[in-house]
Amino acid sequence: MASQLPTSPIAGAINSFNKDGLKPTETAEKNPLPSSADVKQEKTHQNILAEVEGGAKLRHTDTKEKIVLPSADDVKQEKNRQSLLSEVEADHSLKKVTTDEKNPLPDNDGNCHVFQLFSRNWSDENLRAAVLLISRNCRKWDFLTK
Protein backbone atom coordinates (compact mmCIF):
# COMPACT_ATOMS: atom_id res chain seq x y z
CA MET A 1 0.00 0.00 0.00
CA ALA A 2 1.21 3.44 -0.78
CA SER A 3 1.42 5.86 2.11
CA GLN A 4 -1.32 8.43 1.99
CA LEU A 5 -1.44 11.85 3.56
CA PRO A 6 -4.04 12.17 6.25
CA THR A 7 -7.18 13.97 5.29
CA SER A 8 -7.05 17.04 7.47
CA PRO A 9 -7.16 20.78 6.88
CA ILE A 10 -3.39 20.99 7.44
CA ALA A 11 -2.67 18.44 4.71
CA GLY A 12 -4.86 20.41 2.32
CA ALA A 13 -3.02 23.64 3.20
CA ILE A 14 0.35 21.97 2.57
CA ASN A 15 -0.73 20.72 -0.85
CA SER A 16 -2.15 24.09 -1.87
CA PHE A 17 0.91 26.09 -0.66
CA ASN A 18 2.59 28.20 -3.38
CA LYS A 19 6.19 26.95 -3.62
CA ASP A 20 7.29 29.53 -6.20
CA GLY A 21 8.29 32.06 -3.50
CA LEU A 22 10.83 29.71 -1.90
CA LYS A 23 14.55 30.00 -2.67
CA PRO A 24 16.39 26.89 -3.81
CA THR A 25 18.97 25.61 -1.29
CA GLU A 26 21.46 22.81 -1.25
CA THR A 27 22.07 20.74 1.84
CA ALA A 28 25.70 20.16 2.66
CA GLU A 29 26.32 17.15 4.87
CA LYS A 30 29.43 17.42 7.00
CA ASN A 31 31.11 14.40 8.50
CA PRO A 32 34.27 15.67 10.18
CA LEU A 33 37.00 13.09 10.49
CA PRO A 34 39.01 13.00 13.72
CA SER A 35 42.34 14.78 13.74
CA SER A 36 45.63 12.92 14.19
CA ALA A 37 45.79 14.12 17.82
CA ASP A 38 42.35 12.64 18.51
CA VAL A 39 43.37 9.31 16.94
CA LYS A 40 46.61 9.26 18.96
CA GLN A 41 44.78 10.02 22.23
CA GLU A 42 42.23 7.27 21.60
CA LYS A 43 44.99 4.78 20.79
CA THR A 44 46.87 5.67 24.01
CA HIS A 45 43.70 5.21 26.02
CA GLN A 46 43.05 1.81 24.44
CA ASN A 47 46.63 0.68 25.19
CA ILE A 48 46.37 1.73 28.85
CA LEU A 49 43.10 -0.17 29.23
CA ALA A 50 44.62 -3.27 27.64
CA GLU A 51 47.65 -3.14 30.00
CA VAL A 52 45.45 -2.80 33.07
CA GLU A 53 43.22 -5.68 32.01
CA GLY A 54 46.16 -7.92 31.08
CA GLY A 55 48.24 -7.12 34.17
CA ALA A 56 51.32 -6.03 32.26
CA LYS A 57 54.20 -4.38 34.17
CA LEU A 58 52.80 -5.27 37.59
CA ARG A 59 55.17 -6.30 40.38
CA HIS A 60 54.55 -7.88 43.74
CA THR A 61 54.97 -5.51 46.69
CA ASP A 62 55.05 -6.13 50.40
CA THR A 63 52.84 -3.88 52.46
CA LYS A 64 54.08 -2.56 55.77
CA GLU A 65 51.45 -1.97 58.40
CA LYS A 66 52.27 0.72 60.89
CA ILE A 67 50.34 0.89 64.13
CA VAL A 68 50.36 4.31 65.71
CA LEU A 69 49.86 4.21 69.46
CA PRO A 70 48.26 7.17 71.23
CA SER A 71 50.53 9.60 73.04
CA ALA A 72 50.44 10.24 76.79
CA ASP A 73 48.41 13.43 76.24
CA ASP A 74 45.83 11.52 74.20
CA VAL A 75 45.49 8.91 76.95
CA LYS A 76 45.10 11.62 79.60
CA GLN A 77 42.40 13.42 77.59
CA GLU A 78 40.49 10.18 77.08
CA LYS A 79 40.64 9.38 80.82
CA ASN A 80 39.33 12.86 81.67
CA ARG A 81 36.52 12.46 79.18
CA GLN A 82 35.57 9.05 80.55
CA SER A 83 35.58 10.29 84.15
CA LEU A 84 33.36 13.25 83.23
CA LEU A 85 30.90 10.97 81.47
CA SER A 86 30.78 8.56 84.39
CA GLU A 87 30.12 11.44 86.83
CA VAL A 88 27.30 12.75 84.69
CA GLU A 89 25.69 9.32 84.41
CA ALA A 90 26.04 8.52 88.14
CA ASP A 91 22.83 8.83 90.22
CA HIS A 92 24.49 9.83 93.51
CA SER A 93 24.88 13.48 92.53
CA LEU A 94 21.23 13.95 91.53
CA LYS A 95 18.73 15.43 93.97
CA LYS A 96 14.99 14.99 94.12
CA VAL A 97 13.14 17.94 92.62
CA THR A 98 9.49 18.87 92.81
CA THR A 99 7.83 21.00 90.18
CA ASP A 100 5.77 23.99 91.25
CA GLU A 101 3.09 24.83 88.72
CA LYS A 102 2.13 28.48 88.74
CA ASN A 103 -1.25 29.28 87.27
CA PRO A 104 -1.82 32.91 86.23
CA LEU A 105 -5.55 32.21 85.78
CA PRO A 106 -8.09 33.19 88.45
CA ASP A 107 -8.78 30.69 91.24
CA ASN A 108 -12.24 29.35 92.09
CA ASP A 109 -13.23 32.57 93.86
CA GLY A 110 -12.30 34.70 90.84
CA ASN A 111 -9.27 36.20 92.63
CA CYS A 112 -6.16 37.05 90.64
CA HIS A 113 -2.70 37.53 92.06
CA VAL A 114 -0.45 39.67 89.91
CA PHE A 115 3.27 39.33 90.55
CA GLN A 116 5.64 42.18 89.83
CA LEU A 117 3.33 44.02 87.48
CA PHE A 118 5.00 47.34 88.10
CA SER A 119 8.35 47.32 86.47
CA ARG A 120 10.62 50.16 85.46
CA ASN A 121 10.80 48.83 81.90
CA TRP A 122 7.06 49.11 81.25
CA SER A 123 5.75 52.11 79.39
CA ASP A 124 2.65 53.88 80.69
CA GLU A 125 0.65 52.55 77.76
CA ASN A 126 1.63 48.90 78.40
CA LEU A 127 0.93 49.27 82.13
CA ARG A 128 -2.56 50.68 81.46
CA ALA A 129 -3.28 47.80 79.06
CA ALA A 130 -2.17 45.23 81.65
CA VAL A 131 -4.29 46.77 84.42
CA LEU A 132 -7.29 46.94 82.08
CA LEU A 133 -6.84 43.27 81.12
CA ILE A 134 -6.61 42.22 84.76
CA SER A 135 -9.62 44.25 85.79
CA ARG A 136 -11.74 42.69 83.03
CA ASN A 137 -10.80 39.09 83.86
CA CYS A 138 -10.74 39.19 87.67
CA ARG A 139 -13.45 40.18 90.14
CA LYS A 140 -10.98 40.79 92.93
CA TRP A 141 -7.25 41.25 92.46
CA ASP A 142 -4.27 42.36 94.45
CA PHE A 143 -0.60 43.00 93.80
CA LEU A 144 1.98 40.81 95.42
CA THR A 145 5.67 41.57 95.37
CA LYS A 146 6.73 37.92 95.59
Image (cartoon, grey):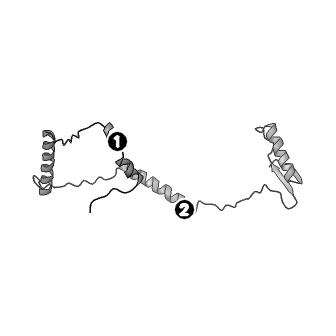
Check the image and name the residue furthest to the right.
Answer: 140
Residue 28: image x %, image y %?
A: 21, 40
Label 1 secondary element = loop
Q: Amino acid at mark 1?
A: Asn
Q: Residue at x 39, y 53 (%)?
A: 75
Instruction: Tell me the tag on residue 18.
Output: 1
Q: Is residue 40 above or below residue 107?
A: above
Residue 106: image x %, image y %?
A: 83, 57
Label 2 secondary element = loop
Q: Residue at x 81, y 38 (%)?
A: 125
Instruction: Tell me the tag on residue 140.
Output: none
Q: Measure how far apart labels 1 and 2 are at the Cα level.
A: 96 Å
> Viewer-proximal residue, 105 or 3?
3
Q: Amino acid at mark 2?
A: Ala
User: Of tags 1 and 2, which is closer to the observer?
Assistant: 1
Neighbours of disc 2 within 10 Å: few (<14), some (14-19), many (20+): few
- Residue under pointer 2: 90
Residue 21: image x %, image y %?
A: 33, 37
Check the image and name the residue furthest to the left.
Answer: 57
Q: Are marks 1 and 2 in contact (CB under 8 Å)?
A: no
- The answer to whether 22 appears left or right of 105 in the picture is left
> Viewer-proximal residue, 100 or 35?
35
Q: Residue at x 41, y 52 (%)?
A: 9
Q: Is residue 79 above or below residue 16?
A: below
Residue 39: image x %, image y %?
A: 13, 43
Q: Residue at x 81, y 37 (%)?
A: 124
Which of the marked residues, 1 or 2, is nearer the chain's N terminus?
1
Q: Quadrant of residue 25?
A: top left
Quarter containing the N terminus: bottom left
> Viewer-proximal residue, 42 or 145?
42
- The answer to whether 51 appears left or right of 2 in the picture is left
